[in-house]
Image (cartoon, rainbow, N blue to C red):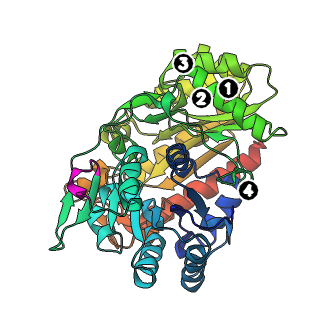
Amino acid sequence: MNNQKNKDLLLLIPPNTESLKEIGSLKFKDNSTPPLALGNLSAFLEERGIKTEVVDYRLQNIDYMDETETISYTKSLIETHNPKIMGVSAVTHVWPKAALIARTIKENYPHIKVIAGGIHPTFMADNCLRGGCDIVVRGEGEETLFEVSQNVLAERPFDLESVLGISFLDSKKRIVQTPNRPLIQNLDALPFIDREKINAGAYAHPGAIISARGCPYTCNFCSCGAMSGHTYRARSAKNVLLEVKKILETYPSLNEITFLDDTLPVDSRRLLEICEGLKNRGLEWSALTRADTLPSEVARAMTGSGCTTLQIGIESGSDRILKSISKGITIKDAEDAVRTAREAGFKYIICGFMIGHPEDTEETVYETIGFAHHLIKKYGVNRASFSIVTPLPGTDLWRDAARKGITIYGKDDWADKAFSVPNISTQYLGREEIGKLQGIAIASTLQLQKELGV
């Protein structure tokens, strides 16, 4: 982190919560990626003259940072940088730590404006504003945060209601939500992230990149589509390749790129152009896909340009369950995708499943486990992961929980909403049953892979 004093704005990633003290630290060490969203905000604001610093608390203590340490570190940041604004970005399961940071700032430095952004604040503005934040930036943050920052830094009164895409409390402590800000259509116009500024080299995958925003699909458990209104906007292949070039100039010894797009092959033509540009660079790269967006031509082009790892989101081994969660695929689509991936020569294939869907029964969960084992036996799938269905704010699953017979335990205890701890029961499965079935899925799959030597 650059220790230069007097930053206009600090952009913060909170530390992990206690529920992730063990599993979270391991995941962070092995799979960590730089805070690209805050990197985008920082680059946009710096280009317009606002001095920023990006701080990831997890880099201070990647195992866990307790309440006292979090408060102390927050105060030290303020004493070092003397900011006028502090922006806290948070997904749902780390919101308790984000709220602690916000309260620490307001209780000790009330002159500093605290702004919250990200998926959780977008859909839970009330929770965030009553938890210590002055303003919530909803949805994409670049233009909105710039407009707010510009006014705060000018130290002049301004009408918050004139700013699109924010939520705040009025003088009577009532929630005010201004109209949504239109999404940025030309992503190529945005500046590239300054990788050194976000200390990308400190993460396991410093070459992580996001080539598009949004998701056009309607899976009931996913907040990505809700954040973007189920729209999809992609950067051009040329722009993506220019960023890859810039990354490699920053880290000359780097030989790996990680695409974090939820579904990289949405636009086959664009991906084919990206693959052509990645050929003969000596790079290995990885990507995520749906089961129905992987034509063989694209799969071969991916492996031919260095893509070694592919993660396929399948979610269930039951067609009935897939239909009930609006996944838009069948188990035939899933098997076809795995077959295509194996034939194309991907070295490492990961299939992702979820347990505890609203319509899941013990029988359908065992169908899912059986289907995962089938893919391992027949196609040598290298890993099958089993996460817990977790209703998150903004998702259809959250909104329709009661109607679907779902009980959400500790609905306001955000720390356990991390896809690893059962926090729901359904009309067919209890909370403990879901956890037990996940344990069976993981243990039996590991045993099978050990027996097969996969």
Image location (x, y in percent) of residue 266? 48, 25
> Residue sitting at 45 percent across and 65 percent down?
85
Mark 4 — residue? 202
> Residue sitting at 59 percent across and 37 percent down?
192
Amino acid carrying label 3: it is: Arg
Mark-to-mark CA distance, 4 and 2: 33 Å
Q: Determine if the magenta segment contains residue 403.
A: no
Mark 2 — residue? 338
Mark 3 — residue? 270
Amino acid carrying label 2: it is: Val
As helix, strand or loop, the secondary structure at mark 1 comes to: helix
- On screen, 184 above or below 43? above
Mark-to-mark CA distance, 1 and 2: 6 Å
Amino acid carrying label 4: it is: Ala
Mark 1 — residue? 342
As helix, strand or loop, the secondary structure at mark 2 comes to: helix
